[in-house]
Amino acid sequence: MIAPDAIQRVKDAVRVEEVVGDFVALKRKGPRYLGLCPFHNEKTPSFNVSPALGIFKCFGCGEAGDAITFLQKHEHLSYVEAIRWLAKRYNVDLPEAEATPEQQLEHSERESLAAIQRFATDWSVAQLWDTDEGRRIGLAYFRERGFRDEVIRTFQLGYVPEQGAAFATAAQAQGFDPELLEKAGWIKRREDGTAWDFFAGRVTFPVHGLGGQVIAFGARTLRSDKKLPKYFNSPESTLYIKSRSLYGIHFAKKAIADSGTCLLVEGYTDVISLHQAGIHNVVASSGTSLTEDQVRLIKRYARQVTILYDGDPAGIKASLRGIDLILAEGLGVKVVLFPDGEDPDSFARSRPSGEVEAFLRDSAKDFLAFKTELLVRDTGGDPVLKAAAIHDIVESIARIPDQVLRQLYIQQCGRLLEVSEQALISELNKVLRRAYRKQQGAGDAPESMAPELQPPQPPPAPIKGTNAQERDLLRMLLNYGHERLLVPFQNEDGSTSEGETSVAELMFELLALDDILFDEPLFKEIYLDYRHASNLGQAVDAARYAGHEQPGWRDLAIDLLTERHLLSPNWKERHRIHTTHERDKLLDALEEGIDILRERRLDRMLEDLDDRLRTAEEAEEQAGILREKMRLNTAKVALSRKTGRVVVG
């Protein structure tokens, strides 16, 4: 168990923009940060991070919370795992009572696998640097590849001895469960239950997650036996999903965000050699076909992807489908083709850094132009093959979501293919209609997607109830409750003087004058909690609710604290809430907000009286209702003069 005061120390140390920034490319916009939401696919940033409040909020999908919530949702951590992650990130000690056997069993498999990978990283690195076999075989191999010692240490490259069970013995001596060691991919077990090292005699390449934790390994054999697979990789687990991971992303994400471009290569050594050459915005798909999840991971940081090919035509054609996925996400795609016999690794190791950078910059070619040249070159002038190539190219163009960009590519490819634009447009429409039918199910795609004209709609009726007004006052309380005001008071002699109070104290007093409490239960709970804490002399701020353990309180508070847009003045008429810039005139804003709530309550009371009047049978009862209506209407007229609305009826 983690002590409550230790948890509070972690919360006090956390900066939400730094935590979220470890996973999402953020750009400052005024007092907040803005980025693409990691929880849903979007093209326009709607993900906001507020350092002042310690919260994030996506206006696209609605996800919201604090740094702990973010880690729970993004990294699929438990609450305790998220606290430990943050404690490590901010160097906060977490004194814990010794766990009982029952508590140890409750540890998640994910946490256990993470612990194994941490141990395996330290162990394999120590084997590389601190043992004769590791230095003679593993370290010598990396140095022969041209890797400098500091780069070897940065990427935490390691070595597993050829002793058969060296790791298994060391890990089990530390108390790690053999079943979990096998799930992590480090050992295999014979029929008699004895373990052997799956990576024995191999150098290791740790795969880091976005936050820098090791989630998997690749291990390369140093033997020349062609029957042996060159690479073994960790199996998928609750900690590691290959289709969602990119090798080098932890080291590359800042450079990718700064440059706006992600360089995509195939293997571990390509990433390391380019990194050593000073080119840090590079990741690898680790030999797998590119997936949608990997593309979306890149999209969080980059607007452009440049794919580096080693010149093998077969490999290039095999990867074209993956590039279509990049186009479909709205990212620009360029291609760099290395000279025959070269790959990113060898090219970067054999040339000065400046020459490598210049080559990547000057050789980058637009992908669709590259694909057009590649496919047309293989047709040999055969009309049938050329028609197939045109269809393939149009399939790629159809993936581009931006219609303007699509049209520009049609024009460019028409020139390269020596085909009329109209022919390409006709083919494009066929592809788009087919995709539409596939997405929507049976039936024909509409000839036009333009919306039909709608007849004029009557103006919306005013919304009954006081929910909108209560919500607005609670928003003011959370945003400005601590702000100090100068309020005029009438003295006993009739003179007026000013006294200082807070927005919260004044709100409590004004609502108490008419014995008003909120009707909406959730609003009422937070209001009463704020009032109670304030009356006890406690300093209350918005963070109390934005980071509250009750999800309902937390989600509502974040909604109220993170308004995406300024409210339109039209909302004042429809919802009867305050819409002017209240920070400049907090006293006016508060008084108007409460007056509007009072007025709306009067409206509701008058409606109730009208209902009673329709069913009243006795003349005396009818007269009493009419007198009450006159009293309420008089009060409403007085309020309307203050709130600026005309009373009709």
Image (cartoon, helix red, strand yellow):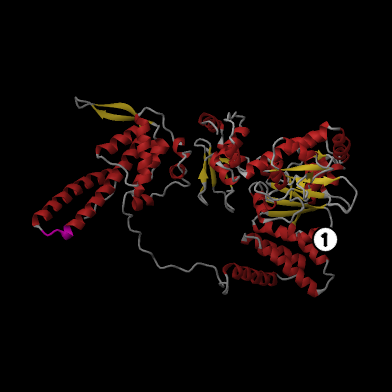
Q: How many marks?
A: 1
Q: Is residue 455 left or right of residue 369?
A: left
SS at mark 1 in the image: helix
The percent position of residue 58, horizontal first and vertical second, equals: 52, 47
The percent position of residue 458, horizontal first and vertical second, equals: 35, 63
Q: Is residue 604 above or below residue 547?
A: below
* Residue 584 highlighted magenta (yes or no): no
Q: Work out which residue is located at the far right of the displayed protein and give it.
A: 224
Residue at 32% in and 55% down: 462
Viewer-closest of 308 and 538: 538
Amino acid under disc 1: Ala
Q: Is residue 558 left or right of residue 594?
A: right
Q: Is residue 182 above or below residue 122?
A: below
Residue 618 seen in the figure = yes
The image quadrant that residue 611 belongs to is bottom left
Viewer-closest of 407 and 251: 251
The percent position of residue 98, horizontal first and vertical second, equals: 59, 31
Residue at 57% in and 50% down: 39
Q: Which residue is mark 1?
A: 314
The percent position of residue 647, horizontal first and vertical second, equals: 24, 51
Q: Which residues are magenta?
A: 613-617
Q: Work out which residue is located at the far top of the displayed protein and give it.
A: 493
Residue at 27% in and 37% down: 512
Query: The C terminus appears in which quarter of the rendering?
Result: bottom left
Q: Is residue 351 left or right of residue 504?
A: right
For label 1, the crowd category at 10 Å Cα-Cα, with few meaning under 14, some 14 to 19 and many 20 or more, is few
Viewer-closest of 575 and 645: 575
Viewer-closest of 331 and 75: 75
Name the magenta segment's main secondary structure. helix
